[in-house]
Image (cartoon, rainbow, N blue to C red):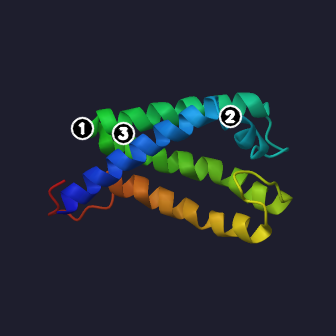
């Protein structure tokens, strides 16, 4: 049963990442630009486009390459860690985006980043017990 849950987690996160990546490149581009901290040394539009391409690539790979799920799950977890400072900056700087228009909402969102990291690791098979089958 753990194998089924892990596969479902991998597929769901992969599809969600593709959707988020496409949104970076199209309909939600301005919202994502608002989340790039002022101190980040790369142009905010280039950052949004680049992160969108990375999200699409990782999402597609997570879905289409199950034999590489461990590697891709680790890369996804690292990606979530890498973008976390932007989420912190959104909270600290009080930037409104994606309906996060209060400090409370922005703070609550910070607690979901570790969930995404764990989700990527679980879907990638990093959290298996030796006797797990998947």
Side of 102 relative to 82 (left or right): right
Side of 131 relative to 80 (left or right): left
Q: CA distance from mark 3 to mark 2?
A: 21 Å
First in sequence: mark 1 vs mark 3: 3
Find disc 3 in the rendering and name its residue: 62
Seen at 69% across and 35% down, the residue is 29
Give whichever of 84, 59 is nearer the camera: 59
Q: Is residue 87 above or below residue 41?
A: below
First in sequence: mark 2 vs mark 1: 2
Q: Quadrant of residue 100?
A: bottom right
Labelled disc at residue 67: 1
- Mark 1 against mark 3, which lies toward the viewer? 3
**Secondary structure under the numbered disc 3 in the rendered image:** helix
Measured as percent of width and height from the top left, residue 66 is found at 26, 39
Measured as percent of width and height from the top left, residue 21 is found at 55, 35
**Secondary structure under the numbered disc 1 in the rendered image:** helix
Q: Is residue 61 visible?
A: yes
Q: Is residue 105 above or below residue 12?
A: below
Find disc 2 in the rendering and name its residue: 48
Counting other residues with Cα less than 10 Å from the Cα at mark 3, is it few (<14), some (14-19), or many (20 or more)?
many
* Residues at marks 1 and 3 touching, judged by CB atoms closer than 8 Å: no
Q: CA distance from mark 2 to mark 1?
A: 29 Å
Give whichever of 101, 77 is nearer the camera: 101
Measured as percent of width and height from the top left, residue 5 is found at 26, 59
Labelled disc at residue 116: none
Q: Is residue 24 above or below residue 2?
A: above
């Amino acid at each position: 049963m753990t194998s089924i849950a892990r596969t479902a987690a991998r597929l769901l996160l992969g599809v969600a990442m593709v959707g988020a990546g496409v949104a970076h490149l199209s309909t939600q581009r301005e919202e994502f630009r608002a989340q790039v901290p002022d101190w980040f040394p790369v142009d905010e539009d280039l950052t949004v486009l680049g992160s969108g391409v990375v999200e699409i690539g990782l999402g597609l790979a997570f879905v289409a390459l199950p034999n590489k799920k461990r590697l891709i799950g680790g890369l996804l977890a690292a990606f979530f860690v890498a973008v976390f400072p932007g989420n912190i900056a959104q909270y600290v700087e009080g930037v409104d985006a994606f309906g996060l228009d209060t400090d409370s909402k922005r703070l609550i969102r910070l607690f979901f980043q570790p969930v995404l990291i764990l989700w990527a690791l679980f879907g990638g098979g990093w959290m298996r017990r030796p006797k797990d089958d998947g």
